[in-house]
Amino acid sequence: MPLLQHIMDVDLEKLALHRIVPCLLNCGFFYLDDFLGDLIGHCVLDQVKELHDSGLLHDGQLAGGWSGVSRRHIRGDKIAWVSGTEEGCEAISFFLSLIDKLVTVCMAQLGKTNIRERSKAMVACYPGNGTGYVKHVDNPNADGRCVTCIYYLNKNWDAKEHGGILRIFPEGKSYVADIEPIFDRLLFFWSDRRNPHEVQPSYSMRYAITVWYFDAEERAEAKRRFRDLTASSQERSTP
């Protein structure tokens, strides 16, 4: 193993064991500044801006339960799903490889060794027109999402002027946690009902990358329920 890779792996393990795991256990969330450093962080930002400028970001979709409500009143972001293997996404791919390693170490220490997959990366932009995302839970119905990871890419962000704060309402706590979406900040939190959260209105272009890690057993059960529901619907619609 090259020396640089070994040093990187050791640093990631220390970060996971000494900082991320204790915070997830005690608070349910954790954030870290200066994760990739200025140079690599800028490379990721440039690739995200290129996706945006190329017209590849589209309106974020709403899950069930919002019928009759304007999408813009619920969430105002534009998104694209990226695997990291696409041409021009090399820095995003590097970022994903690092957080994969972090989550693997964390989950082993948390006794959650059944996390074997994650979503693609959701590249998101709030266009700065005062839209946000109302209070919600990422995984309210046991769809398999276990950990939410968000990486922010906003240089010179001033929350007083630009808004865009992610506010977490930790379950059973007497406080809220306000996370400003500043450049090179990495955030982890549990995806289930322990962490309702909202994105407050943004008045400047706001970029982020979000990834969800799946509990394998819960994910498999969610897929089974979906297959059963689909089969049942098809049977009812057959003349």
Image: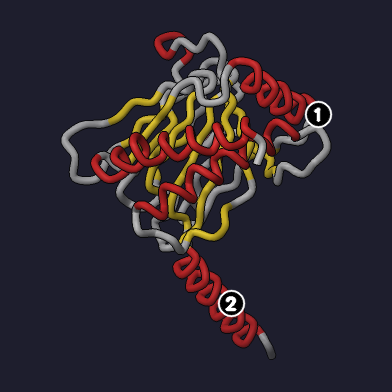
Q: Which residue is mark 2?
A: 227
Q: Nearer the viewer, residue 114 or 211?
A: 114
- Identify the residue at the far left of this view: 174
Q: Quadrant of the C terminus?
A: bottom right
Q: Quadrant of the N terminus?
A: top right
**Helix, strand or loop status at disc 1:** loop
Q: Is residue 102 above or below residue 230?
A: above
**Helix, strand or loop status at disc 2:** helix
- Examine the rendering and report whether any part of residue 68 can be seen: yes
Q: Residue at x 62, y 42 (%)?
A: 97
Give the label on residue 12, or none: none
How was the colour assigned to the protein in this rendering? secondary structure
Name the spot of residue 85 as percent of width and height, x first: 77, 44
Q: Residue at x 45, y 10 (%)?
A: 158
Q: Residues within 10 Å of mark 1 (few under 14, many from 20)?
A: few
- Examine the rendering and report whether any part of residue 78 can be seen: no
In the rendered image, which quarter is residue 40 located in? top right
Q: Is residue 87 left or right of residue 184?
A: right
Q: How much space separates mark 2 and mark 1, taking CA atoms? A: 36 Å
Q: Which residue is mark 1?
A: 54
Q: Amino acid at mark 1?
A: Ser
Q: Is residue 69 above or below residue 178?
A: below
Q: Residue at x 59, y 52 (%)?
A: 119
Q: Amino acid at mark 2?
A: Arg
Q: Is residue 143 above or below residue 55?
A: below
Q: Is residue 1 left or right of residue 64?
A: right
Q: Residues within 10 Å of mark 2 (few under 14, many from 20)?
A: few
Q: Is residue 74 above or below residue 186?
A: below
Name the spot of residue 212 as percent of width and height, x first: 52, 48
Name the spot of residue 37 as percent of width and height, x first: 57, 19
In the rendered image, which quarter is residue 93 located in? top right
